Image (cartoon, rainbow, N blue to C red):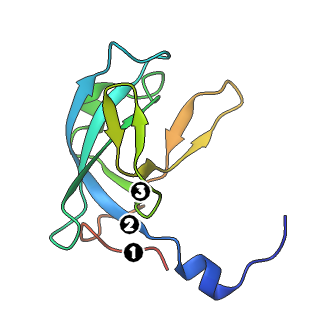
Amino acid sequence: MPDITWEHFAAVQMRAGTVVSVEDFPGARKPAYKISVDFGPEVGIRRTSAQVTTVYSKSDLLGLQVMGVLNFPPKQIGPVRSEFLLAGFYREDGAVVLAVPERRVQNGARVG
């Protein structure tokens, strides 16, 4: 992969937020949840869908602080309008493990 500049990295709006609701997404092609995350007063609550049902239950996610990329354009995923990318890592079995702050930070805090 090519090197990037600090300006490229700074353009990625990756922020911490707290999961405030998790719903089943029965219409998804692959098992997924509809997730709402509070990214603080500057951004507010954003929604997305995520295929994280292999590793996380709804109760595991509720209240969890997660990382999201907020400056991708919205994407329609069936009936859900995805307003951010929930950051995570793929395991060898294809399951997604979420990227989370190691300690609690203010909702809306930026990576940088």
Q: Secondary structure at mark 3?
A: strand
Earlier residue among tags 1 and 2: 2
Q: Residue at x 60, y 77 (%)?
A: 9
For the N terminus, which image quadrant?
bottom right
Residue 41, x across and y down, in percent: 15, 70
Q: Is residue 11 above or below residue 45?
A: below
Earlier residue among tags 3 and 1: 3
Amino acid, disc 2:
Arg
The disc at residue 68 is: 3
Q: Is residue 26 above or below residue 78?
A: above
Q: Are marks 1 and 2 in contact (CB under 8 Å)?
A: yes
Q: Secondary structure at mark 1?
A: loop
Residue that badge 1 annotates: 110
Amino acid, disc 3:
Gly
Give me the C-alpha separation between circle 3 and circle 2. Answer: 6 Å
Q: Is residue 55 above or below residue 13?
A: above
Q: Secondary structure at mark 2?
A: strand
Along the line of sight, the residue nearer the viewer: 50 or 61: 50
Residue that badge 2 annotates: 15
Residue 5, x across and y down, in percent: 70, 85
Along the line of sight, the residue nearer the viewer: 65 or 23: 23
Q: Residues within 10 Å of mark 3 (few under 14, many from 20)?
A: many
Q: Residue at x 63, y 38 (%)?
A: 90
Total labels: the figure holds 3
Q: Are marks 3 and 2 in contact (CB under 8 Å)?
A: yes
Earlier residue among tags 3 and 2: 2
